[in-house]
Image (cartoon, rainbow, N blue to C red):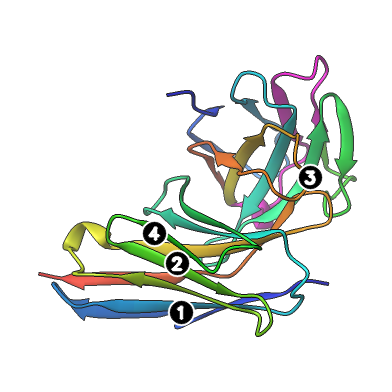
């Protein structure tokens, strides 16, 4: 069964360092999402791509976060510089993208970030 | 702006009991509602997706209902098992598929 892949699974970094997360969606899925989940809360969308274009990045802290999906396939989320409050689980999801608002989203295993 | 609330935040029950988890949402103009399971430190696993035209969806011991007009959904778990212990999240799409999640219910099934 096809799955969303993410790496690394765990990342520990010091404040002010740069970190990057990678996501490979299910093959053929046009829509890719990055969510952030703080411990004890539900995930919140950071950025949504349709193919290589950003659809929604309204909640992305653009002074320190950046995301790209250059060829419309895999994606990278970067934080520079990392802050203590960035400690969270970063989840990637993908969906076929054919049925706006009605597609099932499939989630990867996540990257657990700890900023010291 | 869509808001999703889940009650209770945590629930602990003995093995074998039937239980209900609740989810409410403020904007009833939704395409669907999805229930997820999350084990500690792991990603999300989709359990059930109910389309707006449906009232119920069943998978094994799980049954999810949707009442759009009242802005409510319930997840019913029959004959609970210790392996059901996890956090259960509900989510609805807002705009172009952005999912809005509740804060989750942390379920513990005691042997």
In screen coordinates, is A50 left or right of B78? right
Q: Which residue is mark 1?
A: B9
Q: Chain of mark 1?
A: B
Q: Which mark is residue A96?
A: none
Mark 2 vs mark 1, CA separation in Å: 18 Å
Q: Residues within 10 Å of mark 3 (few under 14, many from 20)?
A: some
Q: Chain of mark 4?
A: B
State the mark number for residue B64.
Answer: 2
Q: Quadrant of residue B32?
A: bottom right
Q: Are marks 2 and 4 in contact (CB under 8 Å)?
A: yes
Who's the residue at 71% across and 40% down the image?
A33
- Residue pictured at 84% horizontal, 56% vertical: B95
Q: Residue at x 49, y 27 (%)?
A: A3
Using the numbered discs, state the Cα–Cα distance from disc 4 to disc 1 in whole angstroms.
23 Å
- Direction from residue A35 to residue A39 in the image, left or right: left
Residue reaching furthest to the top: A71
Disc 4 designates what residue? B58
Chain assignment, label 3: A
Q: Which residues are magenta?
A: A67-87
Q: Is residue A54 left or right of residue B47?
A: right
Disc 3 element: loop
Which mark is first along the chain, 4 or 2? 4
Question: Is the residue under label 1 in contact with that under label 4 (CB below 8 Å)?
Answer: no
């Amino acid at each position: 069964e096809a799955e969303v892949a993410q790496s690394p699974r765990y990342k520990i970094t010091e404040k002010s360092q740069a970190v990057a997360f990678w996501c490979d969606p299910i093959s053929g899925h046009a829509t890719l999402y990055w969510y952030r989940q703080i411990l004890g809360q539900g995930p919140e969308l950071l950025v949504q791509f349709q193919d290589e274009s950003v659809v929604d990045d309204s909640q992305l802290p653009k002074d320190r976060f950046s995301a790209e999906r250059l060829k419309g396939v895999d994606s990278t989320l970067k934080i520079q510089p990392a802050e203590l409050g960035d400690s969270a689980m970063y989840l990637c999801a993908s969906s076929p993208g054919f049925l706006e608002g009605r597609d099932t989203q499939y989630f990867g295993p996540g990257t657990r970030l700890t900023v010291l | 702006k869509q808001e999703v609330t889940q009650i209770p935040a945590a629930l602990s029950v003995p093995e074998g009991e039937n239980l209900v988890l609740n989810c409410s949402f403020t904007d009833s103009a939704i395409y669907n509602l999805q229930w997820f399971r999350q084990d500690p430190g792991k990603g999300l696993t989709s359990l059930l997706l109910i389309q707006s035209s449906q009232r119920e969806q069943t998978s094994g011991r799980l049954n999810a209902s949707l009442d759009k007009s009242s802005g409510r959904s319930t997840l019913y778990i029959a004959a609970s098992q210790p392996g059901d212990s996890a956090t259960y999240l509900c989510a609805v799409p807002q705009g172009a598929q952005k999912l809005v999640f509740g804060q989750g219910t942390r379920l513990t099934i005691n042997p």
